[in-house]
Image: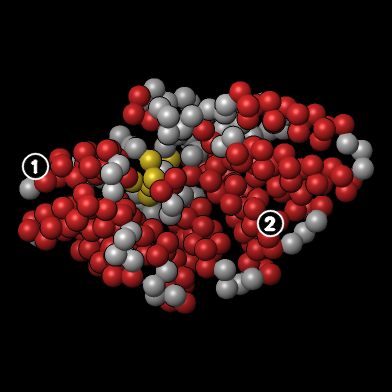
Amino acid sequence: MSRNQILILVAAVALAAAMFFLPKVVVTKEDQDTLANGETTALPAGHSEDDGHDHGAAPAATTDASADGVHATATPEQMLELATVRGRYNKATDAQAKALLANELAAAYANASKFDSAGYYYEIAATARPGEKSYRKAGDQYFEAFTYAATQQRASELGGKARKMYEQVLKNNPTDLDAKTNVAMTYIASENPMQGITLLREVISADPKNQKALFNLGILSVQSGQWDKAVERFQELVDVNPEHVEGTFYLGVSLAEVGKKEEAKRIFNKVKTMSSDPALNTSVDEYLAKL
């Protein structure tokens, strides 16, 4: 999960300080190994303005001042570009030209962080000219919109759209573990979370060092309160990539939760050398103070 897919949340998985870096899709239903019932957190950047197609209900606007600047709305320049390209798209009558303009319009929406609309137009382009890369573009944008979903219903809708696109990708390339991991995360936030967990385990079985799958499995362990498992997953992750900032942070959180205070202090102090992010450093300082 990329840095752009880590939100500032106000939630209670462990201590409030840890919530600065929880993923946007929250999983809470317990299985013998992992909790798996989806819950989502909203941000306005993933929602598009009215562009003539149905994106579902608009997300509620955040009033959290700490999110300002991170989830900014489109700039006037971006809006002008969108209006220009959309006008050309709406006027196009030739199918080939319209497909090319759908790609251009999707890219403009993606540049403006209007992820649902970007997915919509990339899907139009992929339908006109099917291919692994075109379906992947649509899936990635729908998945990004899914991670910003305001409600469980919206997450389910966008997750379903992402899955549909990724399934086309996996038909052409069953070894695309990144697509498979994203499909897994959409299932985890659905009514069938165990299918997502099964897919994550399949990814780990195929690639024991897969950072994205290790991170997500670690997060699921955090959210289910299975701190020993979280330590194991995040330790595996930082062994694979010692520079993984979020993984290192969560390793510190997990160690603190299992009572390994000295190890947790060492890890938290390491995190402070890895990132200049003020929110992260504030979280680390609060944890160190509690330890």
Secondary structure category for the residue under label 1: helix
What distance separates the C-alpha of mark 1 from that of mark 2?
48 Å
Q: Is residue 185 above or below residue 150?
A: below
Q: Residue, x 61% and y 23% (percent of image)?
A: 76
* In front of the other: 236 or 80: 80
Q: Nearer the viewer, residue 22 or 82?
A: 82
Please determine whether, in this image, residue 44 is positioned above or below residue 128: above
Residue 92 falls left or right of residue 197? right
Name the kind of residue labelled 2 in the image: Tyr
Name the residue carrying label 1: 289
Tell me if mark 2 has few (under 14), some (14-19) or many (20+) residues whose alpha carbon lies within 10 angstroms of its own: many
Q: Amino acid at mark 1?
A: Ala
Image point 43% across, 40% down: which residue?
A: 40
Image position of 172 (left or right of 202): right
Quadrant of the rendered structure where residue 248 is? bottom left
Label 1 CA crowd tier, 10 Å (few <14, some 14–19, many 20+): few
Colour theme: secondary structure
- Residue at which label 2 appears: 135
